Structures are given as C-alpha cells and as structure tokens.
Amino acid sequence: MANAVLEVKNITKKFGAVKALDDVSFSINAGSITGLIGDNGAGKSTTIKILSGIFEPTEGTLELDGSPIRMNSPVDARAQGIETVHQSLALIEEFDVGENFYLGREISKFGPLRIAQSAKMNRQAEESMKSLGINLPGGVRRKVRSMSGGQRQAVAIARASFWQSRLLLLDEPTAALGVRESKQVTELIQRLAYEQGAAVLLISHNMRDVASLCETAVVLRQGKRVGLLEGDFTSEDCVAYITGARTDLPDEDV
Amino acid sequence: MGAAPTAAEGAGTFLGTVDEDTRSWWQTHREAFSLRSAGAVYALGILLVFFTVRASQLGRPNYLAASNVGNLLEQTSLIAIMAIGMTVLLISGNFDLSVASNAAMASMAAAMVIESVGPIGAVAFGLAVGTFGGLINGLIHWYVGLNSFIVTLGTLTAYRGIVLYMNDGQEKVISREDSEVLKGWAGDFVGSIEPTLVIVIVAVATAIYFAVNNQRTQVIAAASIAAVAAGTTLATNYAIRIAHQALFMLILLAIVWFVLRFTVTGKRLYATGGNQEAARAAGIVVSRYTILPFVIVGFCAGLAGVINLSRVGAVSPSLFTMRELEVIASAIIGGVALTGGSGSVVKTIVGSSLLFVMTNGFTIIGLSPFITEIAIGVLVIGAASLYVVASRRAAAAGRI
C-alpha cells in the first residue's frame, strides 16, 4: 500500500493465558474508510484499545507513516495524531461544543492563572463545525445535555477530526441512531475521508454500512484475522467471514 | 460506494435547519431564570419580602434594618465558608460528611498549641490540621477506592474523637492576651459599608469593561445603575457592619467563583465531576481533580475553626456538632447536584442565606423554632425535587 497511514504488524495481545488477539496485521490508508468487523469477542475492542493507546500489545508493532511507534496512554495516541471516538462518546453533558472540543487541551492566557479563552475556543469550534457542514440548531454554545444522539455523535466526530488527526478510530458511530441521523453521520464520515483525506477505521455491527462505506474490511474471529475484504464486497460476504462459513486462514490454523 | 456528498450540499440540511441564531436575548438566557437555575434566589426574595411585611404588621423592628442584615451576614458566614468548599467537592462528584468535625478538630488543635507557638503559629497550625483532615479523606477515597460518603462517615466520628481526646473531653479556653490578638485578626468587625456603594463600584467596573469592548447599550445600562446607586448612597445612611468572617467569606467566594467560572482548572473540575471517563480519555489527570477538592473543603473547615476560636476565645468539644448538615443543605438548596459536574458557589451562598434568613425571620415574627426546623427540612427536599424534576423534564423536552 502506497499511502498507508498506519500499519498494524503481527499484533498479539495476551491477558494472562487468554489470547485476545493473535498475530493480527492490516493497514489503514489515508483518504479511505477501513472497516473492522467481527462477532462479540472477536477482538475488535482490544484492537481499538491498542490503537488508541489504552493497551500495549504483547507482541507486534504499530507503524505510523512508516516508522514504529509506542504508546503508553491515550494522550500518547493523540500526540501521534490518532483520535478515537468511543461508543460512549466521552462528551461532558454540562459543557457546550467549544468546551468539549478543547477538553484537556484548553487554550488559556495569563500564564499560571490559566484563564480559559472561551470565546476563541468557541469561534474555532464553530468554524470547524461549519467546514464539515454540521449545522447545529442553537450553535456551538449549546450544551451537550440538550442534544440528540446524532448531534452528539456529530460533535464527537467533529472534535476528533478537529485536532488534525491522521487517523480516526470510530467505534460504532451509528449504533444508537435512527435512520435519518445514521445517514447524516455516515455522510459526515465520508466527507472526512474523501474531502479532508483522513484515514478512518470504522468499527460497526451494521454490515450494510460496512459494505457500502468501506473500501476494505478486516474481519476478526476469535482474535485472528480471518479475512480481508476488498473492492466490491457485500454484507453477505462480511457475514460469511464473521460466522466462520468462509475463512482466508489455512486449514490447520482454524 | 457512491460519491461523497460535499460540505456545501450538506450545509443547511445536517441535523437541523437553523442557519443563524435568530433567537432573542430572552430565549437564549431564559434557562438562567428558570426555577431550576434560580429557584433559591426567588425563594430568598420571597422570604425577605414576607418577613419584612410581617415584621412591620406585628410592629417589630424593620426586618431589613442594617443591623439585622449585618447580623444575618455574620451568622451565615461560617457555614457559608464551609459550604463554598463543599460546593467545589460536590462539583467534582464527591461528598464530605466530616467537614464540621474537621473544623472542630482544627479549632481545638489551634487552641491547644497557642500557648507554646503563639497566635500566628496557632492559626497556621489550625489551617494545616483542617487541610490535612481533608487530604486524608481524599487520599483514602482515591487510593482505597472507597465511596466518599463512607470515608467521611468514618472520619466524621474519628475527627470528633480526636477533638475529645486532645483536651480530655473538656472545653479549652485560651489566654486573654492570645484571645485579644486573634479577635483583632478574625473575630471582630472590619467596619461598615453601604451596600449601594459596592453596587456603584461594581457597576462602574462593568461599564468600563463594556466600554473597552465597545458595547454601547451595556455601558449605558451599567452607568445608569451606577448613577442610581450613587444617588442612593448619598441620600441614605444604610450601612452594614461587616464582620471579619463575612469579609473572609466574601473574599473566598470571589476567588472560588472566579476559578470555577473562568479558569482551565475550573473547567477540568466540572469535567471530572461530570464524566470521569471522558475527562480521563481527554488526558486530564483525574486523581488531581478528585483529591484537590477534599483538600479545599479541609482548608475551608480549618478556616471556619480558626475564625470561631478567634471570636469566642475557647473551643467546646461539641463545637459545630451536626452543622455539616447545614453545610450540605446550603449546597443542595443552591442547586448543586449530588451527581457532580454542575453547581455554582454563588447559589450555594444564597442557599446558606436562606437557612439563616428562615431561622432569624421565624424568630423575629415570633414563630416557634421547631417550625423553622420543619420548614428547613421541607425546603431541602423541595429544592432537590425541583432540581430532579426540572432536569428530567429538560432532558425529555430539550432534545430537538
């Protein structure tokens, strides 16, 4: 792959005697959406946690733009340009959009007094939302508490893309949404990948979403990579790999 | 895999159709005036009017007389000082039942050492003991992972035990000389001030702020308020005597309000209390914003303890017994959520004031103090219910 942003190379993760991930490799390219699919317990969450710096792999390496990286915490991952939108979204209910965008990375003035520059943060959050075509009724001063599921998801994704991230990890972005909001959020994800050139890793249970959105999809089953779908694959292909009806692994490995 | 919709196509259709915020000032600010946000302020206003009218009907002295308002401010201050700390802790998502015991421990500790280390040393030691008491609570909560309610239920008793142990369960009286020195620092009156003069100063400062920001309407409004207040100051002679403890409370209030409202530290504190996982994921050092508020409550308890020693010149082993309930009630009446992540110190002070206005008002209009207790109980439940019900309704209706 010419423009791989992240190469996952032979990652294994053990929890005691349990192998949650076993020699998994794949790559994620700039300007494209890669799917990560599998049944419960397949290793999707472990993978996301390794990529977002929460876990360290037992074996294997991660290469960002061709050079190996080590991450000990989510802060390290963000410093490398890897932003994660967790399923829980990690938004503060009582905060407005600007405050949530800058959570943990606030702009302040007057040195040690650390006076938060709220107006500046809100202005920049507003510009970013606008550039993504997100038009939030009530504007960026609205508190998350008063927002719908789709609006929250949009804010969380916009926040992740705001920090010049090279890699966006999206964990079930449409799982909690209705049909209309799902469509709007998937359109937002497409704009991020195709207009802004972000590399997106999409974890989803919705095989139709994965088949229609992703150029490639990595299929995990019991901690192993059992398939790599590319090009014009269908949701039936996904299901076949997930359930074990099909596999790319040699027979003796299954 | 169709072509991606462009931002231009997406604009205007994404998640809503409101292009500009065309809502009026009232629409964008109405939440601040809602019962949930300002209920305590309304209640305080209504009670003040009620007591004023009733006292004059009964031929009692004017309820809003400068002397009574000064008394109220003085009575409120000690509980209010602890309630300011408690608010910070509640915002961070925790709770301190031991605050009053801790204050008594600090007071007794200062009284015990004053003979050997002198007044400065005693004040410093008292503040340190209170702060340390808070730190212990915070460390146990964080490192053992024990609910703060349980930790401080334990230290509530343990700290009171230390108070009793220090002087064998006896009252500790400090020497007349030491007492005089402390009184001059923290146990007397600072002087008198006309509240309208304070309004003049604040309004002028506000007018200057708006003038710098070129907001003409606001400059005119602030200047008009300043002018009216200045006129009132000259025309009347309404001066309130300010006790040391009231001054300390107001200074503490100003500092904490500023930090919570405008600084990164304040925002991170709200974030930690509102959603600890999100705060941690954002790289905020959650342990710091969890332990520090316990220390702040401890310092406030120490301050209350030292001030009380300065006023009285003695420490009773039962000092502040059960007063933690007033401290916590102040915050709840002021609308601080026990779940963390929201709350305002200014409203907590309104909550403290409500408690003392009720006690003082019922006495002046000649109602039984037992009725006051009942009324305060009802008020606490009422305030908390209001908050819960209003939040539920906002959650149901607010989502567009």
Image (cartoon, grey):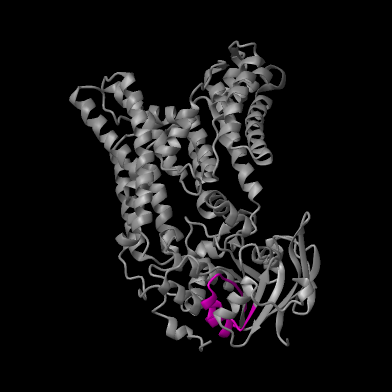
Q: Quadrant of residue A114?
A: bottom right
User: Where does the image place residue B59, in percent across and percent down from the top left?
Assistant: 20, 22
Q: Is residue A204 magenta?
A: yes
User: Where does the image place residue B118, in percent across and percent down from the top left?
Assistant: 68, 22
Q: Quadrant of residue A199?
A: bottom right
User: Where does the image place residue B381, in percent across and percent down from the top left?
Assistant: 37, 35
Please indicate whether residue A240 sits to the left or right of residue A94 in the image: right
Q: At 66% from the left edge and 65% from the top edge, which residue is drawn?
A: A42
Locate the C terminus of chain B by quadrant. bottom left
Q: Give the number of callouts.
A: 0
Q: Nearer the viewer, residue B371 or B221?
A: B371
Please indicate whether residue B216 sits to the left or right of residue A48 in the image: left
Q: Is residue B35 magenta?
A: no
Looking at the picture, does residue A226 appear above or below residue B298?
below
Q: Nearer the viewer, residue A20 or A32?
A: A20
Looking at the picture, does residue B251 appear above or below residue A80?
above
User: Where does the image place residue B355, in percent across and percent down from the top left?
Assistant: 38, 30
Which stretch is magenta? A189-217
Q: Nearer the viewer, residue A33 or B185?
A: A33
Q: At 41% from the left edge and 48% from the top edge, which residue is drawn?
A: B201
Residue B125 appears in view = yes
Residue that sits furthest to the left in the current view = B57
Q: Nearer the viewer, residue A210 or B331?
A: A210
Q: At 50% from the left edge and 25% from the top edge, which residue is drawn?
A: B188
Residue B243 appears in view = no
